Amino acid sequence: MTRLASGGRIDRATDLHFTFDGVDYVGHPGDTLASALLANGVHRVAGSIKLGRPRGIMAAGVEDANALVQVDAPFPEPMVLATTLELYEGLVAHGLSGQGRLADDPDPARYDAMHAHCDVLVVGAGPAGLTAALTAARAGARVVLVDDQSEAGGSLLGIEEGHNDWVSAVVAELRANPEVRVLQRTSAFGYYDDGFVLALERRTETTTSLARQRIWRIRAQQVIFATGAHERPIVFADNDRPGIMLAGAARTYLHRYGVLPGRNVVVFTTNDSAYAAAADLAEAGAAVTLVDARDGSLVTGTTGGDHIAGVEITDTAGNVEVVECDLLLVSGGWNPTVHLYSQARGKLRYDEAVGAFLPDIDPRAVRVAGAAAGVFSLQACLAQGVAASVGALAEQGLVGSPPELPVAAGGADARPPLVLWAVAAGDNAAKFVDLQRDATVADVLQATGAGLVSVEHVKRYTTIGTAHDQGKTSGVIASGIVAEALGVDIASLGTTTFRPPYTSVSFAALAGRDRGDNFDPVRVTALHSWHVEHGALFENVGQWKRPWYYPQGDEDLDAAVLRECAATRTSVGMMDGSTLGKINVQGADAGELLDRLYTNLMSTLKVGFIRYGAMCGMDGMIIDDGTVTRVSETEFVLTTTTGNAAKILEWMEEFLQTEWPELDVSLTSVTEHWVTIPLVGPRSRDVLAAVAPDLDVSNDAFGFMTWRDATVAGVSARVCRISFSGELAYEVNVVAWDGLMVWQALYDAGQPYGLTPYGTETMHVLRAEKGYPIIGQDTDGGQTPQDLGMDWLVSKKKVDFIGKRSFARAENLRPDRKQLVGLLPVDGDVVLAEGAQLIATDDDALLPVPMLGHVTSSYRSAALGRSFALALLRSGRDRVGETLYAWNEGHVTAVTVTDSVLFDKEGARLDG
Amino acid sequence: MQLIPCPYCGPREEAEFHYGGQAHIAYPQTPQELSDFEWAQYVFFRDNPKGPFAERWHHAAGCRRWFRAVRDTATHELLAVYRQDQPRPEVVR
């Protein structure tokens, strides 16, 4: 055991049982998985991803490049760092070679999102962050303090003189302040413009009564990054064995977790900070050998297998000595944790003395304090937190004054640090820069040798910095090695870009509650319960659930649709058309607005009448179609396709606000206000007459494309004579509240005629038989009304309307444009695949051949007794009568080109 | 998540807004008198500067009003917002 008898911030009185790589161990509350493994003498975590080299625990926090584990129980989670995973009872995990596996089962945990707004956000509860937050809190600011550890203190948790009483007092004061929110176990992982910071809070692994993790969306007026620094390794041959660790990490394991990770220790350093680690470990009973690069001694190699056994030390004279050890501590200096600062567009500069990139020019409302700013003495960190806070408060019109600070020992380094990226001696292919990616100095030199001169390119060539740790320990070293290889200044070379997230975030956490049924809103009509009760299958149309078809018995789609179509064309059917977009247009200039937006004239429509219309974009392409009902001189109701309702309202609003604000028109979406029931088929008049006895339903009194206000099933209704099937049809509109009752009344009244409810599939077949295109299915945003054979829909009287000028563009007058046509497969049993390409030959030897068009809609027709299709075809109308071929799911199928109207060309059925 | 200062509602998150492209391009008075080239310039061609750019924005999930903004396309900073009926303001970067 390497756990010391006393010391550390763990609860020795409580045992936590866990399993790693199949072996049972015991740890304590306060442990991470890494500290508990080290306490049990386990250094090796896994083999490396490409080379299979044994790798261990190299750090005590998020910067670890090695210690990835897969959690197996209680719930599988891949790619978790042992150094940040807090130990809990029952944890089962195993080491990962760089690639994990997501669970096959749904995650039973809940995830949530929280929103917070504050004057000052402080990221990091180390010395600088605590004084920053305290200063801001005392000035009366709203403060949020986030910190990724289980308790506040930051670097103080990892040193002997941790000022615990001071930390506790500050935290207690902050927590007692109602304007302050302290979030521990919360990792700020991204800065996203204007003081918006996302943070991940880890709350529980063992209960389901809490959301396991929460994403905090914090909007701050001022942000202070007190994010500390990461110790930098030194690269040398065989620098990757288990038992090679950052010096500061060993200190943290000793003081925070009561673990002495080795008893025979070599410390290899370029700076004074590792001397504290050496002294602390010696005091705890370890034998320590110091190798200070500033004295000319270098570690040039290591020996060992699954654990380090010895260190090869080369002195200035070139003498090589091998020293036995069970722990090699390394310190190459400190990299300020500038990730979030850089994401916030803070400018960095290279500091030669520190050998790292430091914050230089702060972006608006962002400050940085403490080690993150390149200040490493405790006293200076404390003072800088105060200074940053006072500055932030001043921008908010608040006055901050310094709190009393503890007196901290230590000060400036006795000797300046040496910047050493990699030791020259030894095999470059064994000097690991990015341990997780198994990328070495040799890989970097191969990249520069290949001519790469940008660190961004070297990163992508070598994959250095692309693993879970995003180069926290390897990035600056890689820049340094590239600079030396190219003989350029690292300051001009810079770093790769720091991008969010700073630490890994699961998609489950980001999704929060927005998954499963809550992923997207579901819209249902007022008739939905009836459809469900009558066995409808539904299709998604935008967010709407629409009845697709109503199978009876063991009917499949084809059988049900043939039945629904036949019933409707021979007797009567009805459907739920409530999802149609409906826009109420009111005002003195309502007709004028519609004239400018529709291709045809609407202002001439008489009250009581209905007109079909289409709108085009500025480029002349059809964007939507529907009916326009004139309710009064100053009021129209227009319909849009179901999926375009919001888009068309926005389109109309845009012109009204931006181009023609002088028009007196108001627009209101009334889609949900109405339940719309098309009653369709030769017996629809009989059904309507039965439920609307006061309405004269005769053709003379109630003609095609007119509407009447009437009492239907005892309630007020607007009944329209419109048809999307070519049959005699009525569209009954009632207030949604009355919808279900009216639908049921119509259904009951229709039973003598075998009234059949039908869904969207039958609607599609009926309209396609008549050649009515669906905008968005038979068009793809590239068709003019003329392409669809709707010249009749384009007004010649109007001087202008949106899209008109584009019709005359040379491109839109080409005779070989794709035009809407019908297709009849020569074999009437073959239903073409929608999307099938049309070609002029069935001779494979001639392939490849030009593609002439494609199938847009394709069905089996009860009325025609065969299959048919609609298609967009080059020069289509000139090809009517020709035989072409459809490349239909791997087979060539002969088709005859026809007019797009295949059923009741003369329109004899419209009036019943 | 940028904050966009809607001239009617104040600062709101960018997810509430739709982008509407370059501002101050009026619908031509007499489209039928334009050449194909001139019409195509109006329909399809827009400026793409690096730096301040006058744009149309729509507060789609808020007040649903269109307004205009001068935005620095290099930094995304909104230098000014103004109503449809106001001229483009002078902006100082």
Image: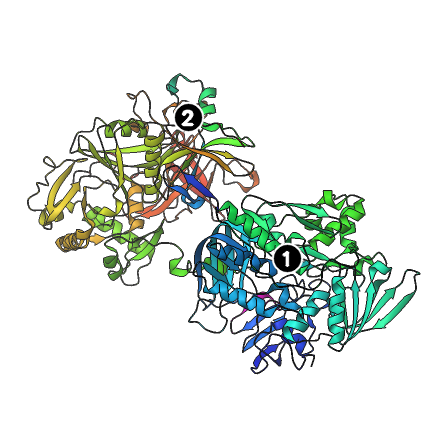
Return the residue found at the far top.
B33
Chain letter belonging to callout 1? A
Instruction: Find numbered disc 2 in the image and state the secondary structure of the residue it sits on.
Output: loop
Crowding near pointer 1: few (<14 within 10 Å), some, many (20+)? many
* Horizontal arrangement in the rendering, residue A462 relative to residue A147 (left or right): right
Q: Which residue is mark 1?
A: A381
Q: Are marks 2 and 1 in contact (CB under 8 Å)?
A: no
Which quadrant is the C terminus of chain A positioned in?
top left
Q: Residue A520: image x %, image y %?
A: 39, 54
- Give A301 or A430, whichever is nearer the viewer: A301
Q: Is residue A584 above or below residue A73?
A: above
Marks 2 and 1, how far apart in space? 50 Å
Q: What span is in magenta? A: A74-84
Crowding near pointer 2: few (<14 within 10 Å), some, many (20+)? few
Which quadrant is the N terminus of chain A positioned in?
bottom right
Q: Which residue is mark 2?
A: B87
* Horizontal arrangement in the rendering, residue A582 relative to residue B2 (left or right): left
Q: Nearer the viewer, mark 2 or mark 1?
A: 1
Return the residue found at the far left.
A694
Residue that appears at 52% across and 46% down = A394
Instruction: Find numbered disc 1 in the image and state the secondary structure of the residue it sits on.
Output: helix
Q: Report which quarter residue A702 is drawn in.
A: top left
Q: Is residue A53 something that shows in the picture?
A: no
Q: Is residue A257 something that shows in the picture?
A: yes
Q: Residue A822: image x %, image y %?
A: 36, 38
Q: Residue A527: image x %, image y %?
A: 23, 54
* Membership of B46 in magenta stretch: no
